[in-house]
Image: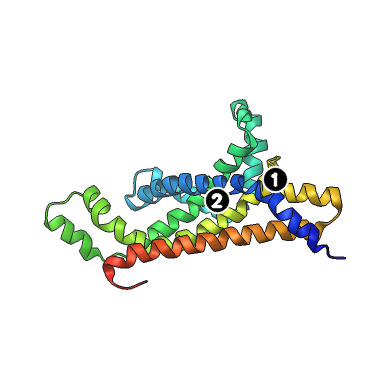
Amino acid sequence: MFDLGYLLSALPRLLQFMYLTITIAVLSMLFGLILGLLLETAIRRKVFLLSTLSKVYISFFRATPLLVQLFILYYGIPQVIPAFGEINAYWATVIGISMNCAAYLAEIIRGAIRSIDYGQWEACQSIGMTRWQSMRRVILPQALRIALPSFGNQFVTVVKETSLGFTLGLTETMAQAKLMAADTYKFLESFLAAAILYWLAAIVYGYIQAAMEKRVNRPYGHEV
């Protein structure tokens, strides 16, 4: 029989582990964004060899399950490179999700930049801007406005993907819910409590994203 009292008591217990979920998601998104920008730049500028390697990277990480990637990183690579065995479960999760996230962010960034009219580039060049100045001052701010909704969707996905950290032995929200369920046999209540917390995190971020979109759209006088 469903135990509402246990569900309500499980929420604050699981909430103590949400800081791990959020920090993993934020760090993964940050590192993924940096790597994604590098991948997109290598492809767009057609850098010798790096362009091809970037395309292969994106193809691999988008086509294979994240769980497999985490297992390769945490269990497989240390057999070949022992130094990687020093990485703990927390940072292995961050690195794994970051590398996966970067492949998707690179494509989001590429699509946003390509959506900017080429006349913008020409206008920048006509007033003597370098390519880097054009990108930093004109193209990227506009591309960010276009890509922001997709970034938000990707961040929510990353928050959910942090639950795979328990497969590496990391005790985050999902792992704690699993432990509580195994101890009490209240599987529905435990996992439902975890689901509610993930849902609430997505709702809170939704308000944050809406505020960011409103801010970046203010100069244009309308919303995307």
Tell which of 33 and 26 is nearer to you.
Answer: 26
Q: Secondary structure at mark 2?
A: helix
Q: Quadrant of residue 81?
A: top right
- Which callout, 1 or 2, points at the residue further toward the start of the chain? 2
Q: Quadrant of residue 86?
A: top right
Q: Which dot, 1 or 2, sits closer to the camera? A: 1
Give left or right: position of 179 versus 104: right
* Residue at 64% over, 37% down: 89
Where residue 80 appears, x then y in whole percent?
Answer: 63, 30
Give the SS element for disc 1: helix
User: 56 or 115, which lies in front?
Assistant: 115
Figure quadrant of the N terminus: bottom right
Q: Position of residue 183 (x, y in %)?
A: 85, 47
Residue shown at 27%/58% (left/top)?
139
**Quarter-of-image position of residue 185:** bottom right
Q: Amino acid at mark 2?
A: Phe
Q: Nearer the viewer, residue 98 or 60?
A: 98
Asked if residue 137 shows in the view, the reply is: yes
Q: Amino acid at mark 1?
A: Phe
Q: Which quadrant: the C terminus?
A: bottom left
Q: Are marks 1 and 2 in contact (CB under 8 Å)?
A: no
Dot 2 crowding, Cα within 10 Å, few <14, some 14–19, many 20+ = some
Q: Is residue 156 left or right of residue 193?
A: left
Left or right of residue 156, residue 166 in this image: right
Against 207, is 64 above or below? above
Residue at x 63%, y 33% (from the top left corner): 88
Residue at the disc numbered 1: 166
- Residue position for label 2: 61
Distance between the alpha carbons at the discs numbered 1 and 2 = 20 Å
Q: Residues within 10 Å of mark 1 (few under 14, many from 20)?
A: some
Q: Position of residue 131 (x, y in %)?
A: 22, 50
**How far across and down, in percent of the image, does residue 38 sit?**
39, 46
